[in-house]
Amino acid sequence: MRIPLIAPSEPSLKQLFPRKGGGGGHGGGSSGKGGSGSSSGSKGGSGSSSGSKGGSGSSSGGKGGSSGSSSSGKSQSIPLSGSTGGKKTATTYGSGGGRAVTIPAGQPFAGRTSGGGTRGQVYGTSTYGSGYPGLAAGSVLGRGFPFIFWPVVWGGGLGLGGAYLHDHEYGSPTNASRPGGALTQATFTSNSTNSTFWVVADNATVSALITTIYDNCTLGSNSSTAPTPFSGNASQAQPEQVIQYYRASSVALALDGYNDTAKLTNPNATDVPLPSWMDTQLEGCLNATIAASVPLVSAADMRWQPPVGIIGLVWLLSLA
């Protein structure tokens, strides 16, 4: 996917530069909040469409496609649930960063690193396991959590795809202990073509992105206003429909009707071109807005804090 230039909303938000696979224009959708698709102010001209395909085997490649830009947005603090190491909030449009820490013994995924990922590192590719800074795509097995959040998991068994798509160490899509809560999905439709996009991520992230996408993109009337529980069933987004991963594969953007079935068994397969009927304006706006606003944990919060229950247990033992 072609990666646009994104203008920062505040000094701490670093500019995201195009990856291998092409640059991009500055077009974008105008605000269409309310779901009717009517605009309340244009955000620029049309973004450029088409683009050369980038590589699919590492986080530096990307699928060719359209471009666009999100408007700058105001940072908002998003409450986090689940196994976050005591980190209670993430921030939309925040810069992330800070020092990575090692998850201590007695906690889920002890010994792995957590945190340190920045806004400029959120882009992956269309390949599962992409978006991990410095690591090649194609696997999430045994990896740390540069953005705190766990990778998306796909439902179904090994018969429905390669083993790399079905790493069960992160539990099922309904596992509420994942940072941000269980996986959910949002639908975003075009107001001009028969294009339907899905965003899959933890509940806190999807809720936040619904707001920022409505603020920045022109949408059709059937677009989601609230997250829907994600289980990976056949009526929901599937791994072969993903056109872009973000934030260490913890967020997926998928296109209904797109089928890159070779990726089900081979993460290094050449990407299937994006269809000509796709709304490139909406795709570009979604891509840019997700990258610019997906919630990140700030540098100030990058320290491991034991859950309150553990603190209470230690205190009780000290009284014994």
Image: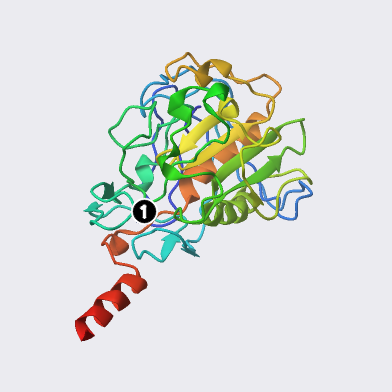
Colour scheme shown: rainbow
Whether 187 is drawn above or below 19: the answer is below
Which of these two is toward me, 196 or 241? 241
Task: Report the residue that reaches farthest toward the front.
Answer: 320
How far across and how far down the image is residue 31, in percent? 67, 50
Say what amino acid the circle numbered 1 marks.
Ser
Q: Residue at x 43, y 64 (%)?
A: 89
Q: Secondary structure at mark 1?
A: loop
Q: In the rendered image, which residue does mark 1 sit on?
A: 95
Q: Residue at x 42, y 17 (%)?
A: 268
From where the camera sits, is residue 23 visible?
Answer: no
Tally the numbered discs: 1
How far across and how far down the image is residue 115, in percent? 30, 51
Query: From the viewer's perspective, is 111 left or right of 70?
Result: left
Q: Residue at x 34, y 46 (%)?
A: 145
From where the camera sits, is residue 43 visible?
Answer: yes
